[in-house]
């Protein structure tokens, strides 16, 4: 323990921990439904080999394969009576892998969440949670680890119980690490500053951030934690970006080189331990090792990334059709702009932004519904307000998640009465990542089913049960389309289902390679069903080099060519890079005009002024 503390206090180079165990095991054929922890007993060679690969890559800390080895999680597999033995074996396997290492390697006894909710948000009392943690820790201590790692905690109450359990049983160093949602809060809404303060007060020797998003987010959170508790010791172990699913596989976008760049950034920001979490591999750790050993070998990352994500008359009844549909029918190149509802009661900024966009020539404002599952004003109210006060058409984002059949149909009727005619049907963000993780997250209809309900039901004058609703609605229905899908065949199959159910138009993710997007549309045509519906192609202007790097590495579905990134990087100061981003976006739009019916602008960081500037360029070229 003394050697570990001395190495930890070496301010020259952070300790390098290993990367993911679970996702690597899955890649090697172990199903997620299995107990990974049981492998310590039934396939110890597989576990040891992964430890050895991380050590060969340069890791100085290896984490035991005991993330879920607590009574609650093991009970799901009938293994609750083997808590002690599984944890002891986990330490022994990691220790065996470290025996022949060329540098000192310390073994961290890994402790994950219990997999149950603690009071007041669940039924497990704090004292019961602490008892479960103590049982697991006793098993780990039988194997004689060098430190204890409490990781991927989402509940600060649960993390505190784990720390207190560890401190009651051992004097070994305790690292307590929390995970955060996309908006830099825990699932229960705690800020990085609060997390750092509370973990420090509970007695954690090292305060950590792990899992969450990619390196950019964790660098931002690290700085907030460091500011809240300046004298504390910190650990950072990010996921390899936000995961996406393709062809039955879970993929992570951030590569080893990107991790190598951030290893130095974490060190400069004050991290004493760095490593990886889900999606990271021995290759990621090797890149971090190389960067820590030779800082000049990697391009420096600047201080963090910005976050991407802040009508004429009121008409009721069915006497008004979709203005958006009319513009498509007339062959107008349509410009839609995305806006988020306010988090509180004030709508003044929203109105001013919409007025700016309307003056510039935007055709329609797309209003999101609780993006990132965060509490915001109802998009119905925002759509009605913008149509009434700003005199601009709107598209209502209509997620199916969290709505049963009664609510879906009632909400559709309400939207129509408010004069809303354009709806964009989407699944919606899971409540688990937002303000209220315990909120109901069920749904009766998938997006394809809701498209069918609207187009073949409501627009024909009947509800889901076939009962008349008085008179037909006149909704113009949009659906999502991925023009650069990881699994083209699956995307084409899904697209055909949306078309069969009646989708009128499509919205896409940001596109930076129009030629490849056009190739996908040609693939669709070759499949026997060319897309003959309007497509609004996503365009997200790049704000600076950090923004470009972040999108390319950490946002699923976005790929930015090196040539575009190089242009942003060479542009110059803040104003020049923003201007170059607008110039690039304008060039992309000129290519999109050859085959797209419009664009779906996503203003970076709610910079509606940049969107207005881009609209000016679009309208100037239309004349």
Image (cartoon, rainbow, N blue to C red):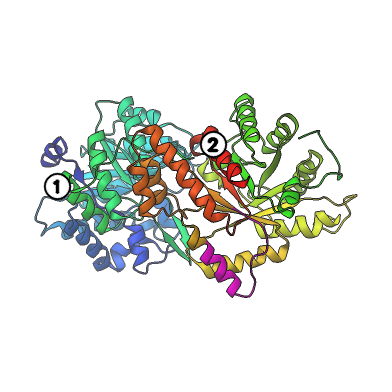
The number of discs equals: 2
**Distance of label 2 from label 1 (alpha carbons):** 45 Å
Quick one: SS at disc 1? helix
Residue for point 74% across, 60% down: 452
Q: Do tag 2 and tag 1 residues touch (Cβ < 8 Å)?
A: no
Q: Is residue 99 left or right of residue 269?
A: left
Residue 186's image quarter?
top left
For the N terminus, give its image quadrant.
top left
Instruction: Kindly identify which numbered label has been placed on residue 613.
Output: 2
Residue for point 32% across, 64% down: 39
For the C terminus, give its image quadrant.
top right
- The reply to whether residue 81 is in sight is yes
Q: Is residue 379 left or right of residue 258?
A: right
Q: Is residue 314 left or right of residue 171?
A: right
Mark sitting earlier along the chain (2/1): 1
Around disc 2, counting alpha carbons within 10 Å, would you say few (fewer than 14), some (14 to 19), or many (20 or more)?
some
Residue in front for this viewpoint, 274 or 515: 515
x, y (%) of residue 290? 17, 51
Magenta-tinted stretch: 518-536
Instruction: Kindly identify which numbered label has been placed on residue 293.
Output: 1
x, y (%) of residue 19? 28, 53
Residue in front for this viewpoint, 315 or 246: 315
Residue for point 51% across, 36% down: 610
Residue in front for this viewpoint, 65 or 380: 380
Residue for point 15% across, 35% down: 11
Examine the rendered structure and indicate whether residue 30 appears above or below residue 386.
Answer: below
Quick one: SS at disc 2? helix
């Amino acid at each position: 323990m003394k050697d570990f503390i001395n190495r930890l206090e070496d301010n020259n180079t952070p300790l390098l921990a290993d990367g993911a165990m679970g996702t690597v095991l899955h890649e090697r054929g172990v199903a997620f439904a299995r107990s990974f922890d049981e492998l310590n007993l039934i396939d110890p060679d597989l576990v040891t080999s992964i430890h050895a690969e991380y050590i060969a890559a340069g890791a100085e800390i290896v984490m035991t394969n005991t993330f879920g080895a607590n009574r609650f999680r093991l009970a799901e597999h009938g293994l609750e009576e083997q808590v002690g033995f599984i944890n002891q074996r986990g330490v022994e396997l990691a220790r065996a892998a470290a025996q022949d290492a060329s540098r000192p390697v310390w073994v961290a006894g890994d402790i994950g969440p219990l997999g149950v909710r603690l009071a007041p948000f669940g039924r497990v009392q704090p004292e019961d949670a602490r008892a479960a943690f103590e049982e697991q820790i006793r098993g780990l201590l039988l194997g004689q680890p060098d430190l204890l790692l409490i990781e991927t905690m989402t509940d600060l109450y649960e993390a505190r119980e784990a720390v207190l359990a560890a401190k009651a049983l051992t004097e070994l160093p305790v690292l307590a690490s929390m995970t955060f949602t996309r908006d830099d809060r825990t699932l229960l809404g705690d800020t990085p500053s609060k997390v750092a303060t509370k973990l420090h007060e509970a007695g954690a020797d090292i305060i950590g951030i792990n899992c969450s998003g990619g390196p950019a987010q964790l660098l931002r959170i690290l700085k907030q934690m460091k500011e809240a508790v300046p004298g504390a010791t910190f650990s950072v172990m990010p996921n390899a970006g936000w995961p996406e699913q393709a062809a039955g596989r879970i993929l992570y976008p951030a590569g080893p080189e990107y991790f190598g760049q951030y290893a130095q950034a974490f060190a400069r920001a004050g991290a004493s331990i760095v490593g990886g979490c889900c999606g990271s591999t021995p290759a990621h750790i090797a890149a971090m090792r190389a960067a820590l050993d030779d800082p000049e070998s990697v391009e420096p990352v600047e201080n963090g990334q910005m976050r991407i994500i802040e009508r004429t008359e009121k008409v009721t009844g069915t006497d008004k059709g979709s203005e958006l549909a009319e513009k498509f029918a007339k062959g107008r190149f349509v410009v839609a702009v995305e806006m988020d509802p306010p988090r509180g009661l004030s709508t003044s900024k929203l109105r001013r932004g919409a007025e700016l966009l309307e003056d510039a020539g935007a055709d329609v404002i797309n209003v999101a519904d609780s993006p990132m599952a965060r509490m915001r004003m109802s998009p119905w109210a925002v759509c009605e307000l913008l149509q009434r006060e700003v005199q601009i058409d709107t598209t209502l984002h209509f997620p199916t998640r969290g709505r049963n059949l009664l609510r879906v149909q009632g909400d559709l009727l309400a939207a129509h009465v408010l004069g809303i005619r354009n709806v964009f049907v989407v699944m919606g963000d899971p409540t688990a990542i937002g303000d209220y993780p315990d909120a109901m997250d069920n749904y009766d209809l998938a997006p394809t089913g809701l498209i069918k309900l609207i187009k073949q039901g409501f627009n024909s004058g009947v509800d889901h049960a076939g009962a008349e609703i008085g008179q037909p609605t006149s909704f113009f229905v949009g659906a999502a389309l991925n023009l650069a899908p990881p699994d083209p065949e699956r995307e084409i199959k899904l697209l055909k289902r949306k078309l069969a159910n009646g989708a009128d138009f499509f919205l896409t993710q940001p596109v930076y390679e129009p030629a490849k997007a056009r190739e996908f549309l040609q693939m669709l045509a070759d499949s026997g069903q060319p897309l003959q519906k309007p497509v609004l192609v996503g365009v997200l202007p790049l704000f600076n080099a950090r923004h470009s790097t972040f999108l390319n590495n950490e946002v699923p579905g976005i790929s930015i060519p090196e040539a575009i990134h190089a242009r942003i990087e060479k542009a110059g100061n803040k104003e020049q890079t923003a201007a170059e981003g607008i110039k690039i976006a304008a060039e992309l739009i000129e290519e999109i005009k050859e085959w797209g019916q419009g664009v779906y602008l996503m203003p970076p960081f709610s910079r509606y002024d940049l969107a207005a500037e881009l609209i000016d360029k679009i309208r100037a070229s239309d004349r």
